[in-house]
Each structure stands twice: as C-alpha cells, then as structure tokens.
Amino acid sequence: MDYVNLGRTGLKVSRLSFGTASFGRVRDDEACAEVLEAALEAGINFFDTANFYDEGRSERITGRVFQGRRHGVVIASKVGMRLNEGPNRIGLNRRTIMEEIEGSLKRLQTDHVDIYYAHQLDVTTPVDETMRAFDDLVRQGKVRYLGCSNFPAWRLSKALWTSDVGGAWPGSTAFSRGTTSSNAASSASWSRCASMKAWG
C-alpha cells in the first residue's frame, strides 16, 4: 500500500481510504468488522465515517473494531446532515457542531478524530460561525484536521478567506461526491483543495 500526505499536511494516509456509509444499513456488525479487518490487513489506515451514517451506528462499529488500535488508524467523521426532526440536529451552527462532536467521540471510543468534515453546505449559518466552532475544536484537541464535503468551489474559497481574515485554522482536505452542478465545478473544487494550506 502506498502512503501519501493528506493535502499539504504532514499526515500520512493510505492512497485508498475505506468508507463506512453502508455500515448498519446493508451489512450486519460482524460483516462490517470483517471487512474493516481485511482493509487493515491490506494496509489501509484511512477510514471515513459520519454521525449521519445509520444515525451513528457506523461510528459505533468502527470504534468497537479499532478499540485498542487507535494509534494505527486515521479516522474521519462528519457533521451537518439531518439526524432527526429537531430544528438543531442539522447544519453547521455552533451548537450542532459542539454537540455532535461529543456524540461522535463517544461512539468512536476515542478522544479525537483526525479529520472532521463539514458534510454539506449550510446556507442558513454564517460561515464565520462555522469556522470559529471548528477552530475551537482544533484548539481543544478534539479534532486534528478540518475538511469539507459536497461544497461548491466558491463556497470553499469563502470559507478559507474567512479563516484567513479571522485567524481560524484553515482546512486541509476536501472531496466531492458529485453534488456540484457540473464537472467543471467539481474540478474547481479539487483545484482549490490542492492549494489549501497546512496549519501553522
């Protein structure tokens, strides 16, 4: 397995990452554990999950499998998707971010996540509120790196500009799941990602 730097950081991750979106929905716990073990044996050290995946069950399975082996894996999780009908169980406002990281850490049985993604764009919350909340999680040691998923390039640029002006930690990684309006927009997101700064 080849290992590469995560964006422009010094963190080494396997060239292939393992996603757990289907855990709990279409695979039982035992089957999930087996494929996680197989991924580890193949040299994968980068595992992606989210609070949204089967309402946290994916995180619980992942945390259970990696208990006692946390130092050997890079774990990413996400926040921002709707979890239930409550008005504050969705989005990237400060309250949601602060509450959901605690739930993710508990389910993953760890004191930090290596990468914490904004799972989707939240047009109802000011970007500086989101960036400041993420910045506080980094300063508290609960998050090592920040990223975003499913963001148009111009929104990503605005978030980075806000972090520069406000002194918050800039992001380190981004990826697209094809939700941008065109291939050109997706390419723009990736290009902007490539120029992101490491924290310093």
Image: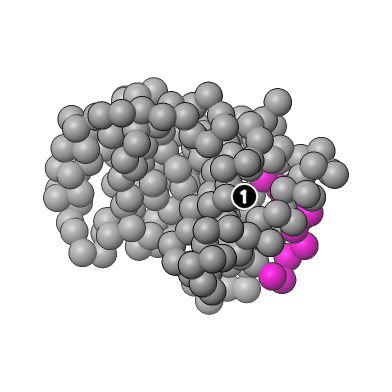
Q: Which residues are magenta?
A: 123-134
Left or right, 110 with reference to 189 = left
Residue found at x 57% / y 43%: 194
State which quadrant residue 3 falls in: top left
Secondary structure found at label 1: helix
The three-letter code of the residue at mark 1 reads Arg
Magenta residue check for 30? no
Residue in the foreground of this view, choosing between 190 and 42: 190
Residue in the foreground of this view, choosing between 2 and 112: 2
Q: Quadrant of the N terminus?
A: top left
Left or right, 155 with reference to 193 = right
Residue in the foreground of this view, choosing between 143 and 64: 143
- The residue where tag 1 is placed is 192
Residue 122 point in image, percent of width and height: 65, 67
State which quadrant residue 64 falls in: top left
Give the number of marks. Answer: 1
Left or right, 125 with reference to 62 = right
State which quadrant residue 87 falls in: bottom right
Image height check: is 2 above or below 191? above
Residue in the foreground of this view, choosing between 75 and 174: 174
